[in-house]
Image (cartoon, rainbow, N blue to C red):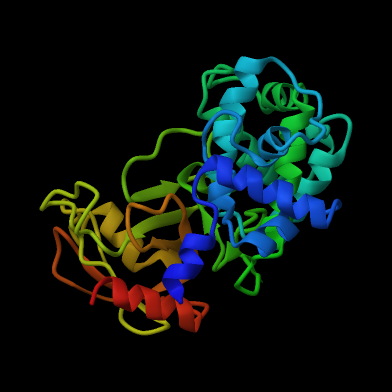
Amino acid sequence: MLRSIREGVARTWKQRVDALVRVRSERSDADLSAFLDETGISLAEVFTGEAGRTWFGLQRAAGQPFPEDGPPAEAATLDKALGRLLHLDDPRRLACIIAWASAPTPPEVSSLTRPERRLLRMVVTSLVGSTSLVPRDAPLAAGLALLWRHPRVLADLRALCAALRERVTHLPIELTTPPDVPLVIHARYARDEILAAYGEGDALAVPEWREGVRFMRCAQVDAFLLTLDKTGGGFSPTTRYNDYAISPTLIHWESQSVTRAASPTGQRYQHHVARGSHVHLFARLSTDERAFYFLGPATYVSHDGETPMKITWRLAHTLSGDLFASFAAAVA
C-alpha cells in the first residue's frame, strides 16, 4: 500500500505540472495549500531551490497567469533563496511576512519596533543577504528595495508563508528575556536568522558564524548550536562533542575543547545567572537540517571536567514529547 501511494505522488517537475493542471480542472481556485493536500506533494518539491521552480513557476508551466517580475537574473537568485525558508514555523513571523509582502511598498524600517525590525531583517538577510545581489554591508533598506522590484517573488513568498502557517506543529512559546529578541521556543531558525534576531551587526547581511558557540554581546546571550547526530557532516574527533537530551528538561552539552572551568568563558557559563547573562540552546538532529529548534533559555546545573567542560543545563521549558523522542533516537 505504501509503495502504491509513493508511486502515485508526482516525482518529476513535469508530473507536478500535470498534477496542478488536473487539480485546477477540478478546483479552479485551488491555492498552494489545497494543491499540496490534493496531491501529497511536499513544499520542498514545489520550492526546490532552483530558478523558476516555485509555486508561480509551477503555475506558469501549467499555463496559468503569471505575475509581473523584475530583472530575470535577480529573480532566478531569489527563487533559489525561497527554498531556504521551508523551515519557518513561527506563526507570528509568518503573519508578519505575509502582511509585509502584501503591501505595494516595503515597510519603513524607522517606523518599526525593535523586534519588528529584527523579524524583518531575519527574512531579508535569508533571501538577499547571502547573495551577491547587494553588498554585504548594505543597509536593510537596500535589500527591501531589491525584493519589492519583484512582485512575483513577493507573491511566492506570501503563498509559501500561508502554506507554512497551516503546517505549524508546535504551540508558540514567546521568549521574554532578554527583551526585543523575536524568537519563539520550539520553532526553527537558521544561523543567519538567529544572528539577526539577537541584533548582531547592523547591515543587511549578518556576520559569519561557523562555530557551534557564540556570545551575543549585544544581548548578553551565550547561544549554543547542538547537532545531535555527528556520524556525518565532516565532524573531526576534536569537534564531535557529546551533546544529548538527558530528559525533557535536562541537556548534556560539551564546551569547545579548549575551554577550562577557570577561564573567563568557563566562569561565565557557571555563573551566568549571577552575572546577568543568558544561555540559549538550539538543536538539530543532523547536518542534513539547515535550521535548529530553539530549545529556549537554560540554567547551569553542574559540570564535569574541562577541555571540554561537560555541562548539564536545565531548560526553562520542557521539551515537547515529539522533540524529546526524536532527540533521544538521534543519539541512541
> Relative to the observer, which residue lies in front, 231 or 257?
231
Q: Tell me the residue at 16%/51% (across/down).
A: 258
Rendered position, 75 above or below 23: above
The answer to whether any part of residue 278 appears in the image is no
Q: Toward which corner of the image does residue 77 lie, by quadrant?
A: top right
Rendered position, 313 above or below 64: below
Q: Quadrant of the C terminus?
A: bottom left
> Relative to the observer, which residue lies in front, 10 or 281?
10
User: Where residue 173 sits in the image (x, y, percent)?
Assistant: 64, 71
> Relative to the observer, which residue lies in front, 195 or 286?
286
Count of numbered circles on the image:
0
Rendered position, 159 above or below 105: below
Q: Residue furthest left?
A: 237
Q: Is residue 50 left or right of residue 224?
A: right
User: Where residue 102 sits in the image (x, y, percent)?
Assistant: 85, 41
Q: Tell me the residue at 58%/18% (across/down).
A: 133
The answer to whether any part of residue 17 appears in the image is yes
Q: Is residue 64 left or right of residue 5?
A: right
User: Where residue 246 sits in the image (x, y, percent)?
Assistant: 31, 81
Q: Tell me the residue at 34%/60% (across/down).
A: 226
Q: Is residue 45 left or right of residue 71?
A: left
> Relative to the observer, which residue lies in front, 163 or 55?
55
User: Where residue 220 sits in the image (x, y, percent)?
Assistant: 49, 53
